Structures are given as structure tokens and as C-alpha cells.
Image (cartoon, helix red, strand yellow):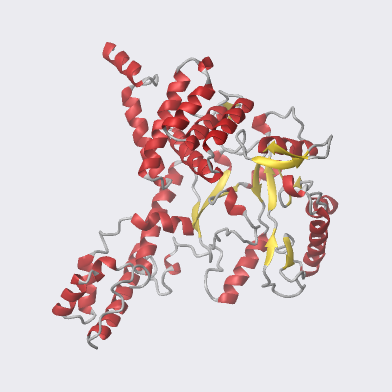
């Protein structure tokens, strides 16, 4: 027991060394899943323990001094992430954190993108250990509802606004502007933080129909009921949504009772949200077409024209669109392929939401594919497998030796090999989400393809055949095709054109 006390004083965190070791393992796993580089992971873990030390010391010792110490020794973005976490826990007032963040930004000129990146990774690590029960740096909970992670610590970057008394342009904090906006729609300053809304967006069924129409028109993708479409930077759902997060969380229908929505961003467009379940046509029209932002007149006119057009077409998919690049509105009665920007239908979920209110999580395919590049598939696809397929395809011993010596075997990375890596990572993530209580997990594909469906990978997939076996068959066919091209080149006496290529169907 005495020895344990010595260890506690030495690590200066107030917890056992065994718990420290366990927490480090959990953080390493969480940061790995989040795609953190080793240096980032090491610095974030170091910041977590420094933050814990701050919590274990005298609370009045000075958070500014502690934050500046972290900024100097580890990094300014790490210091900002740590202080934001303390605010989420209710341990520092917002005004103090704002002052600390401003001081760090002024001294170190830290890019906002770097702060956002490190904060996201820091919270991944902190959540991993607080969720485990170690309870090192968990967010504050009031009446069963978590504060933070998008509620208390909103955007700290300055927002341009106007002073009500002088009319002059001034800078306000994001949290202050948000409070001003919510006050204008009836949520006064006496509404507690835990009951303030979190933002999202509404997707109309006609938006999904339009995506399926585009798939049918192009002949590429999935228009079946199991299609899930990845949200892009420009999208029917609204442009710029990826800036708010790439992973889409779909809430259960019961949440609709405390959700309101309006056209565009409320703080920018000045919309007046309407309840999601409202069937009052005047209230809905007011939320969609009565906009009071800087471009309110133009946006209101466009929205009203789109509302009229949607009633003619009985199709709501273009109600959030603007005029096209030529200044023309879409024509009714026909499919619109013009390039035009789109406002999201911003949702406000009063009081946020809990994990048991999540219906489904959609993870973007393009992000999954990037993360999966190092996923191991050597148990089924390796040099021996490729050599065997090439030999079956007609390459003789000397030709195989040449292919191997040229490094073609190790460079082979077909389309289906990439898909197999992505599928394996997706399957792992699906199981992790199920373990956390979220039973519906999908990979959202730009063309709506369901990568968990064997028929998405082969039209001739046999009944009961699993995705992996279909992809292995596809890989064999792709390697065989590669072998035929190599054989043709080599027997012409030419050097194979594929030696220096990487990726794709080589």
C-alpha cells in the first residue's frame, strides 16, 4: 500500500499506475481508429495526463498558466483542446476558456483547422477512457444528459456581426451569436445549457428520390431500397454539410417532437424555424421563405419560387436550391441537371440527444476507403495466390520469375483488393457500434452502393454467398485479366507497361 502511494505521487495524476496503463491502451486504440499519427497520439496522451494532473492539483492554481505550459511543452492546439474539455466538464467558465484560447491564438498563431483536428482526436481519447469507467475526464452530466461535445463548447472563432446600438461591424464569439439567434426565436437566456439545441439537418424523402433518379440516369450505382448515399460537399441535402462532420447520425422518429427546422443556417439566413411535425402551411412557408439575412430578399424570392414549383411538380427536392450559374430557375415538369447551390434545411434538436435516440449511423465510404489502406488481407491475397492465378492464366515459369523480379506481385492492388480492405474495416466498425448500443450501421456510398450486400459486388453472386468470397473471386478475375495483358506485352518482346503503376487494376 505504501508503495502504491509512492507511485501515485510520482505520476501526479491521482490514480493507480495499473489504471494509467489501461487508460493508455484504450486511448491508443481509440486514436488508431480515428486515424491519428503516432506523434499526434503520443502528444494527445501526454496532454490527457497533464490535464489530469491539473484536475488533481489546487483548482485555483491558475488555468491560464497551466494552458500556456501545455501549449509550450506539447502544442497550442493541445492546450486549447484540454481547456475546452474542462469547460465541457463544467470545471471552467466559458468566459475564462475564451480568454485562455484568445491568449494562446495570439501568441502561437494556431490555424483553426489544426485546433479542430486536435480537439476531435483529443475528445476521442478522452471519451474512450471516460466511457470505460476509469472516469478520468468525462463531461459533466446533469439530469442524465451530457453537456459538451457540441453543446457547451460551440465555435470559438470570431463571427462578424453588428452592434445593435451603433450599427458598427463587430466581432462576436460563436456562442454569443448563437445565443442571440436562439433568443430571437424564443429561447431566452434563462434556458439552461443542457436544454439548448444541437444543430443538424432535415432530409426530405424527395431528396433521396432525386439521388436515385441520378443513379438510374447514369446507369451506375444503387437505386434499390437498401441504398445509402454519402453526403458530398455539394449535395441535394445542402452544400457544405461535410464541414459539420462526415459521419451522419440519423435520429429516431420520437426526437421529431422537439425538433424544428428552417431554410439555411439560422444565424446566417435569419430564418424562423417551424416544428418538424407541423402541418400548418403558413408556418412551413414562413420557415422556408421568410429569410432576414444579408441576402434575405434574394433568398426569400428564390425559396418562394421553389415552393411554388414544388407544388406544381409535387416534388420537394429542389425547394432548397438557388438560381443556376446563368441566373435561371429550374423548369417544372422535368429533371433538373443544372449546377446550382443548395441551402441545407437546418434542424434544431432541443436538448440534444442520447445514444438510445440514435436510429442509424452512416459512415462515409470515401473516408472508410482512405483509412482502410493498411487493412490486412494477406490471409487470402498474397504473392503465392497471385502467382498461382497468373500461372493458371498461362504464364510460364520464366515469365513468372520475371514478373516477380520486377516487383509486379508486390505492387498489385486491384479494385476488388481495395474493396476487400474497406469491407473488412467496415465490418469491424459495424461490430464496434453494435457493442456500443447502435444496431444499425451502414457505409454511405456516393452512388448508394451497399457494400454489405454480395450482389453489390457481383451480379452473379450465388444465394447464401458472403461478401468476402465474392470479392476474392473478383480479385482472381482481375489478376487473370492483368496476366493476359502482361503475357501479351512480354511475348511481343516489350517491357510490360504496368511495372511502374500502383493502384487501380494492375
Q: Looking at the image, can residue 135 be seen?
A: no
**467 is higher (above) or lower (below) than 480:** above
Front in this rendered view, residue 36 or 455: 36
**42 is higher (above) or lower (below) than 227:** above
Front in this rendered view, residue 222 or 401: 401
Q: Residue furthest bottom?
A: 492
Position of 367 with respect to 310 (left or right) is left
**148 is higher (above) or lower (below) than 328:** above
Position of 313 with respect to 1 (left or right) is right
Q: Can you say which quadrant of the picture contains the N terminus?
A: top left
**Where residue 310 sits in the image (x, y, percent)?**
77, 65
Q: Residue furthest front?
A: 107
Q: Can you say which quadrant of the picture contains the C terminus?
A: bottom left
**Where residue 387 sits in the image (x, y, percent)?**
21, 71
Using the rendered view, name the quadrant where residue 48 is placed: top left
Front in this rendered view, residue 248 or 105: 105
**Where residue 354 sits in the image (x, y, percent)?**
57, 38
Position of 402 with respect to 117 (left or right) is left
**Where residue 231 sits in the image (x, y, percent)?**
57, 58
Position of 220 with respect to 186 (left or right) is left
Residue under the image location 84 percent in, 34 percent down? 165
Instruction: Report the number of numbered marks.
Output: 0
**341 is higher (above) or lower (below) than 462:** above
Q: Looking at the image, can residue 16 be seen?
A: yes
Front in this rendered view, residue 380 or 277: 380
Residue under the image location 35 percent in, 43 percent down? 38
Q: Residue furthest left?
A: 397
Residue under the image location 78 percent in, 47 percent down? 270
Using the rendered view, name the quadrant where residue 27 is placed: top left
Amino acid at each position: 500500500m505504501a508503495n502504491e502511494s509512492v507511485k501515485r505521487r510520482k505520476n501526479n495524476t491521482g490514480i493507480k499506475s495499473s489504471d494509467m496503463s489501461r487508460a493508455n491502451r484504450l486511448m491508443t486504440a481509440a486514436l488508431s481508429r480515428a486515424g491519428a499519427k503516432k506523434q499526434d497520439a503520443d502528444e494527445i496522451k501526454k496532454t490527457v495526463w497533464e490535464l489530469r494532473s491539473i484536475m488533481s492539483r489546487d483548482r485555483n492554481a491558475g488555468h491560464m498558466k497551466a494552458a500556456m505550459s501545455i501549449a509550450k511543452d506539447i502544442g497550442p492546439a493541445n492546450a486549447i483542446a484540454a481547456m475546452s474539455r474542462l469547460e465541457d466538464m463544467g470545471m471552467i467558465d466559458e468566459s475564462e476558456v475564451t480568454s485562455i484560447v484568445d491568449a494562446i491564438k495570439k501568441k502561437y498563431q494556431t490555424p483553426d483547422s489544426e485546433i479542430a483536428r486536435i480537439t476531435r482526436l483529443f475528445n476521442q481519447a478522452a471519451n474512450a477512457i471516460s466511457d470505460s469507467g476509469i472516469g478520468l475526464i468525462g463531461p459533466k452530466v446533469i439530469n442524465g444528459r451530457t453537456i459538451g461535445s457540441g453543446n457547451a463548447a460551440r465555435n470559438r472563432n470570431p463571427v462578424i456581426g453588428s452592434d445593435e446600438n451603433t450599427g458598427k461591424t463587430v466581432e462576436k464569439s460563436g456562442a454569443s451569436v448563437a445565443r442571440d439567434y436562439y433568443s430571437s426565436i424564443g429561447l431566452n437566456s434563462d434556458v439552461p445549457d443542457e436544454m439548448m439545441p444541437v444543430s443538424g439537418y432535415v432530409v426530405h424523402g424527395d431528396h433521396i428520390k432525386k439521388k436515385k433518379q441520378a443513379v438510374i440516369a447514369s446507369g451506375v450505382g444503387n437505386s434499390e431500397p437498401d441504398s445509402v448515399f454519402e453526403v458530398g460537399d455539394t449535395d441535394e441535402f445542402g452544400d457544405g454539410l461535410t464541414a459539420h462532420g462526415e459521419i451522419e447520425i440519423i435520429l429516431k422518429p420520437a426526437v421529431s417532437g422537439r425538433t424544428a427546422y428552417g431554410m439555411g443556417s439560422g444565424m446566417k439566413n435569419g430564418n424562423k424555424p417551424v416544428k418538424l411535425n407541423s402541418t400548418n402551411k403558413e408556418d412551413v412557408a414562413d420557415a422556408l421563405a421568410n429569410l432576414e439575412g444579408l441576402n434575405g430578399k434574394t433568398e426569400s424570392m428564390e425559396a418562394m419560387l421553389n415552393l411554388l414549383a414544388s407544388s406544381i411538380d409535387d416534388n420537394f427536392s429542389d425547394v432548397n436550391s438557388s438560381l443556376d450559374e446563368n441566373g435561371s430557375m429550374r423548369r417544372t415538369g422535368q429533371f433538373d441537371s443544372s449546377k446550382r447551390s443548395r441551402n441545407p434545411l437546418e434542424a434544431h434538436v432541443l436538448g440534444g440527444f442520447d445514444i438510445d435516440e440514435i436510429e442509424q449511423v452512416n459512415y462515409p465510404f470515401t473516408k472508410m476507403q482512405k483509412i482502410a489502406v493498411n487493412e490486412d488481407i494477406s490471409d487470402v491475397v498474397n504473392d503465392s495466390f497471385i502467382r498461382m492465378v497468373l500461372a493458371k492464366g498461362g504464364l510460364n515459369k520464366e515469365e513468372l520469375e520475371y514478373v516477380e523480379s520486377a516487383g509486379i506481385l508486390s505492387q498489385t492492388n486491384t479494385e476488388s483488393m481495395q474493396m476487400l480492405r474497406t469491407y473488412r474495416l467496415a465490418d469491424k466498425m459495424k461490430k464496434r457500434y453494435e457493442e456500443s448500443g447502435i444496431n444499425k450501421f451502414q457505409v454511405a456510398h456516393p452512388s448508394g452502393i451497399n457494400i454489405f450486400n454480395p450482389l453489390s459486388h457481383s451480379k452473379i453472386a450465388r444465394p447464401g454467398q458472403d461478401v468476402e468470397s465474392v470479392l476474392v473471386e473478383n480479385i482472381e478475375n482481375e489478376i487473370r485479366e492483368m496476366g493476359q495483358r502482361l503475357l501479351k506485352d512480354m511475348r511481343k518482346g516489350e517491357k510490360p507497361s504496368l511495372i511502374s503503376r500502383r493502384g487501380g487494376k494492375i
